[in-house]
Amino acid sequence: PSIVVTATEDMLWAGLEMASEDLNIPIPEFTVAGVPHGNFFAHEWFVATDDRVDATELAAVLDAHLKKLNDDYEVERNHALKAVTARVLPEQVFLDFMKSKGKVGGQHKFPRVVKGKMLEDWNAFLKESVQLS
């Protein structure tokens, strides 16, 4: 599974900014992964905010904005992209992951799309950090 190529990073940020405004929460960091969903695929969003927000509502609001922003995304949502989910995490989790990779500082940005080895590492890190908290 992969991220819809038409979903540019700018569009992803625009959709998140609109969702952020709608839900009145700051979203300083995010990443998204294409994951298997039956014979199709889904997008799993990992969204940083230290505010309380319902992850299901966030996913629905974000998905609605992305459909408005990009016709190709809307077509994909009606065909191959069968689900959009969100996982809300404290911003510190993103910072700690980058630190664990030796990537600290302004020149190192969290990847907007995670896949392959990076996705495996990210999921393992999340599993471990949830057990610690």
Image (spheres, helix red, strand yellow):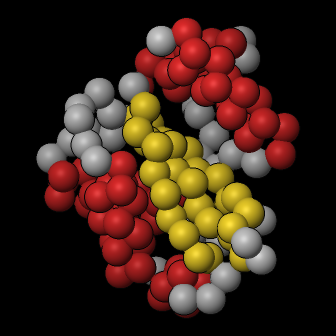
User: Is residue 121 toward the left or the right of residue 21 in the image?
Assistant: right
Rendering coords of residue 51 (x, y %): 23, 32
In this orientation, does residue 128 appear? yes
Residue under the point 54% across and 70% down: 83
Figure check: 114 above or below 1: above
Rendering coords of residue 16 (x, y %): 36, 55
In this orientation, does residue 2 appear? no
Rendering coords of residue 120 (x, y %): 78, 36
Q: Which quadrant: the N terminus? A: bottom right
Rendering coords of residue 111 (x, y %): 63, 40
Figure check: 15 above or below 97: below
Residue under the point 68% across and 32% down: 122
Q: In this orientation, which residue lies closer to the viewer: 2 or 58? A: 58
Figure check: 62 above or below 122: below
Q: In this orientation, which residue lies closer to the viewer: 36 or 51? A: 36
Residue under the point 15% across and 47% down: 24
Residue 89: name its quadrant.
top left
Residue under the point 68% across and 59% down: 34
